[in-house]
Image (cartoon, coloured by chain):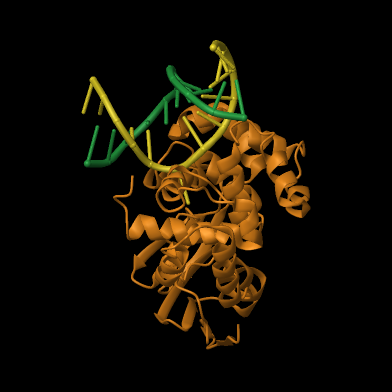
Chain colours: A orange, B yellow, C green
Amino acid sequence: MSYHVESNGNDIIIRGVRDFSLAQTFDCGQCFRFTINCENHVEGIAFGRHIEMYQPDPETIQLIDCSIEDYENIWRNFLSLDDDYSAIKEQISERFKKCSNDPDEIINKAMDLGGGIRILKQDKWESLCSFIISQNNNIPRIMKIIREMSEKYGETVCYYKDGKACTEYAFPTAKALYEAGEEAIFQLKTGFRAKYIYNAAKAVYLNEISLDEVYTMPGDAAAAELMKLKGVGPKVAACALLFGFGKTDAFPIDVWMKRIIARYYPGGLNVKALGEYAGIAQQYLFYYVRYINPELT
DNA sequence: GCTCAGGCAGGCT
DNA sequence: AGCCTGCCTGAG
């Protein structure tokens, strides 16, 4: 964590970063609004801001055309720069030794491969809504729906790139989607999820559910609260909590995790016993099978 | 045509 | 508690 930050007037340069790979972080399915332009170069929108990032070497992250204020107010936290992932990985390794029968030490292999993954700290509403959209859906289409939803109902995000003024769109607020209405949301090809999205937007906007309160709740209570919303089951709730509410113990079990557990942990995996970073471990495992062993069935 | 995509609700036993 | 089944849509 002994990184240090400097500005050259245009860019923020973060040196001495460890356990961080832009490519891995933005290619592990946690975030739908960033694209990997080329290797070690990503660009996207979060918290109503555009950001372009470059990783010239493993220990350096460059935030292009970024002010100190934006770095401190948004990106420092968003990128989880102050979390000690070396310690997190050590604890995960220890826990898996104790709590799972893992003779092949799959978790350690997974952490060697995807050790640069960081769990982003995304916006609560965006995370919840995005993972409602994600159900029974594939990633390119999820991204397309969210992009079009943002273009229609999100605030404009202006920025300069290569000296030119550009416009993008923030993720729509709950208010904006509520006011757009269910039919408009259906028009975005969201299908049977339209009513879920609309109802969630309504509940959040009218304060029938408080995402700020969910944020402060312990994991189980937080999940139960989110699952009061139609269209939010255990998997969607866990994803939202892990990626948008800072609940690193939330452990999403999707079809891939079921395959991983069946294949590598036939005796089962005691998720509760994996501790406060179980969800981060889940991401390493997920990345591992997706990119090393995708034929796993 | 078919199946599948990082699920969920509703109805059934 | 666990096991079906249908569901919008688009890609292969």
Locate residue A105 relative to residue B8 in the image: left or right: left
Q: Quadrant of residue A92?
A: bottom right
Locate residue A30 relative to residue A127 in the image: left or right: left
Q: Would residue A9 be visible to someone looking at this image?
A: yes
In the rendered view, tell whether residue A52 sits above or below residue A125.
Answer: below
Seen at 75% across and 39% down, the residue is A209
Q: Quadrant of residue A69?
A: bottom right
Q: Quadrant of the C terminus of chain A?
A: top left
Near-viewer residue (A35 or A238): A238
Near-viewer residue (A28 or A206): A28
Q: Quadrant of the N terminus of chain A?
A: bottom right
In the rendered view, tell whether residue B12 sits above or below residue A111.
Answer: above
Locate residue A82 relative to residue A156 in the image: left or right: right
Seen at 32% across and 60% down, the residue is A292
Residue A74 percent location from the top left of the image:
63, 68
Residue A83 percent location from the top left of the image:
63, 73
Residue A182 percent location from the top left of the image:
57, 28
Q: Would residue A123 be visible to someone looking at this image?
A: no
Near-viewer residue (A142 or A233): A233
Number of labelled discs? Answer: 0
Near-viewer residue (A253 or A167): A253
Seen at 66% across and 37% down, the residue is A227
Residue A258 percent location from the top left of the image:
46, 44
